[in-house]
Image (cartoon, rainbow, N blue to C red):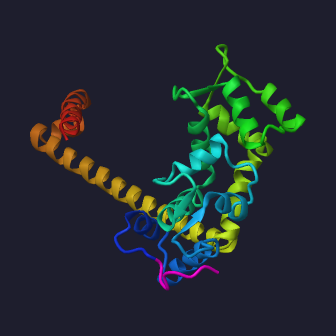
Amino acid sequence: MGGGHSHPPIDDDERILKVVDTLEMTSNEIGMLWDAFRAYDHNAVGSISKIDFFCNICDQREWETDFGNAILELCDVKDEGTLDFGQFTQICGTFGAFQTKEMLQFCFFVFDKDKNGHMDEDELNAFVADIYGNAVPSNILSVIKGLNFDEDGRLYYPQFAAMHRQFPAVLYPVFQFQTNLRTNVMGAKWWNQRLARLRMDRDDKEAEEAQQEEQRKREEKRMRKKAMIEKMGWFQYYFNPIKRAQVAKVYAMGDSMAQGVG
């Protein structure tokens, strides 16, 4: 194992600190990440070769590809041949943490070469050739030929996501790439447990925010009713539905204007 720092160099490195915060990593876990990096820092120079990263950590023999370059673009690459610990952490903490939806969005963005919101058949074929190293299995080619492009030969993200749900084998190399990374950096069990916990925390937060929003709407409705009764009087409010509807419309317009200003 490489020597060098006895502790990971994380001080003031915003890339590392962001990953640590996002994945809620403990100091011991940061040490595990540092050990995974130092195992390939053969000369204890504070960097690992991209060949080691792709070929040994990610088990990818064909890595000088558009997809491989896109992964490198997830971090601030300063040297064409190596990755420092910050870059290594940024890639692992981003690509390694992608959920299925995020992975599909990443793939679609990378190979939507014109960045016009859709792939044409040539772009999709180029994508598949890229991730399979130009040795695309015949069954995968058959799937591509059978896809429902629109009348202009375009495939939009919903159709791309539907393709994955129906034919997950098409993107197998992409997800295997991520699986290899997770297995060799922190271990698959750690990733599964950590991402499950973060997903649960996110779901709990979204549920709490939804509950707060519902409470806000109920309170807003109660206050609007109170204001309308004060304006119309109790009798008119309850026994003149036409006038009540007119007044309610005025209040609704006022709410819309207030939201627009906000």
Q: Quadrant of the N terminus?
A: bottom right
Residue at 64 percent of width and 76 percent of height: 39
Q: Is residue 9 above or below residue 214?
A: below
Residue at 74 percent of width and 55 percent of height: 60
Nearer-the-camera pick, 87 or 26: 87
Q: Is residue 12 left or right of residue 224?
A: right
Nearer-the-camera pick, 219 or 94: 94
Is residue 245 in view? yes
Residue 59 percent location from the top left of the image = 74, 60
Is residue 146 in view? no
Corner quadrant of residue 171? top right
Q: Quadrant of the C terminus?
A: top left
Asked whether residue 6 is drawn in magenta, I would say yes
Majority secondary structure in the magenta region: loop
Count how many numbered circles sit on residues in the image.
Answer: 0
- Over which residues does the magenta segment extend? 1-8
Residue 68 percent location from the top left of the image = 63, 48
Corner quadrant of residue 243? top left
Corner quadrant of residue 159? top right
Q: Is residue 121 left or right of residue 89?
A: right
Residue 257 percent location from the top left of the image = 19, 33
Asked whether residue 48 is drawn in magenta, I would say no
Q: Is residue 150 above or below residue 112?
A: above
Residue 248 percent location from the top left of the image = 22, 34
